Image (cartoon, rainbow, N blue to C red):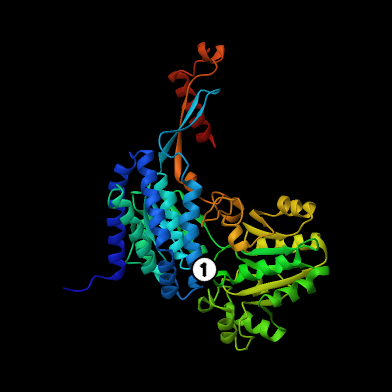
Amino acid sequence: MPAIDKDLQSIQEARDLSGQAFAAWKEWSTATQEQVDRVCAAMATAALDASERLGILAHEETGYGVPEHKRLKNEFASKNVWESIKDLKTVGVIRHDVDHKLYEIAWPVGVIAGLTPSTNPTSTVMYKILVAIKARNAIVIAPHPAAAKCCYETTRIMAQAAIENGAPEGLISCMQHISLEGTQALMHHKYVALILATGGTPMVRAAHSTGKPAIGVGPGNVPAYVDRSADIEKAARFITASKAFDCSTICATEQSVVADAPIAAQLRSLMEREGAYFTDPQQTDLLRNLLFYPDGSMNTAVVGKPAEYVAGMAGFEITKGTRILVTPIKKTGKEEPLSREKLTTVLGWYEEEGWEAGCERCIELIQFGGRGHSLIIHATDEDVIMAFGLEKPVFRIAVNTMGTLGAIGLTTGVMPSLTLGAGGVGGSITGDNVTTTHLMNIKRLAYEISPPPAAAMVPGQLKPGPSPQEIEKAVRSVVEDLLRL
């Protein structure tokens, strides 16, 4: 018997999993809050217990990042995400406005197609399953082909825990035969009600082009402004550690430092002490040519790689133990490739005189590649901090913290999430950190609280329209006029 083509296998798998998910969802949509919370708690525990093993598996399969950091991301995606949603009411009446005699009733969306990236594979799967199932949805994971095995294993662990605690089989699944055609078939399937896409720009565009509701978030180009009022030592420590975290594979990682001129030399010295290597002009040019192709796309061979590996590929040696490479640059835009998002251990470096100039540089960087995403500011001057908060076209501004962990909600009070909306300016439907509340609909049971206006109850005086004879006469007149022309 001839082998079945991979794309056909993938399409059939997408159809099968969608059908199974829909059948399971019809049962799950009637689950009680107690059943939902029991299943989600069990999944969160199972995922947390497997965090280290799955982090190693993700690193081995993709070659990206640091296993220990992937473990931390997995712990965040299981423990912290669950703790942020566990008390949410997602079944029945979730809110009652007594004064307005209004009841709000939770209603699930249905089957969700969850597209996940290779940079944060297992953690994104954990997060998406938890926020989807908590809202009484079903979910089919469509992983990046470079992370298919670790995503499937993560899904298997969580699905098993769900079934053992009363969830129907087929509610949670993951594609194993990955192809573009299969993912397209999943997104277009009649049973898929919503697409939750996290990854590169092409993936997000594909999700938005299906004609279905889609929550798609793509790349960021996060600047980190360091003001003269900042705790410079803390800023140096946090920026270096954040950029090195999992080799810069989180979209909220700092991509460029914008240093206030009076403290730039001190910040540089302190960052060097933390393991940052500042490149000379020749080395900077080698990195330009290595990291990006002429069309602006990034060389995937350097994604998620340690600094020593990247420097070696570029053709120069650095001090052993270097954590990140910092490239001093002056321009922003297409003529300076290093002003783009860099999903590896390379950080741009700008120096500007005063916060106003720093503000303008940050806006340039955001407009070039990270509209709506995130920005980091290190300062103690509250007027400067608020000016950045009011003026920047981004929806997460993390203050005096690591960009990597602050924007996702580990070190700040924003909602813990691994899907960070960029708002309308960034092509997203929301600027929020996406969570369970974005994956359920709200019905409203509304009682009358004021009588209708009296005029609405009285029959209006309708002006009669033209009679058939009058219409015929008007048409005949127009025809005669045309014939005379």
Taking the view exactly as shown, the residue that stands out farthest to the left is 1
Q: Position of residue 484 (x, y in %)?
A: 53, 34
From the viewer's side, name the closer residue of 258 and 400.
Answer: 400
From the viewer's side, name the closer residue of 242 and 207.
Answer: 242
Amino acid type for the residue under numbered disc 1: His
Q: Secondary structure at mark 1?
A: helix
Figure quadrant of the C terminus: top right
Figure quadrant of the N terminus: bottom left
- Relative to 330, does residue 76 appear above or below in the rendering? above
Query: Measuring 38% from the left and 46% from the top, which residue is drawn there?
Result: 137
Q: For mark 1, what is the residue?
A: 69
The number of callouts visible is 1
Left or right position of 181 against 252: left
Q: In this rendering, does residue 212 appear at all?
A: no
Residue 15, quarter of picture: bottom left
- Relative to 72, does residue 213 appear above or below in the rendering? above
Q: In this rendering, does residue 31 appear at all?
A: yes
Query: Measuring 51% from the left and 73% from the top, which residue is drawn there?
Result: 66
Q: Position of residue 185 (x, y in %)?
A: 35, 58
Left or right position of 256 against 65: right
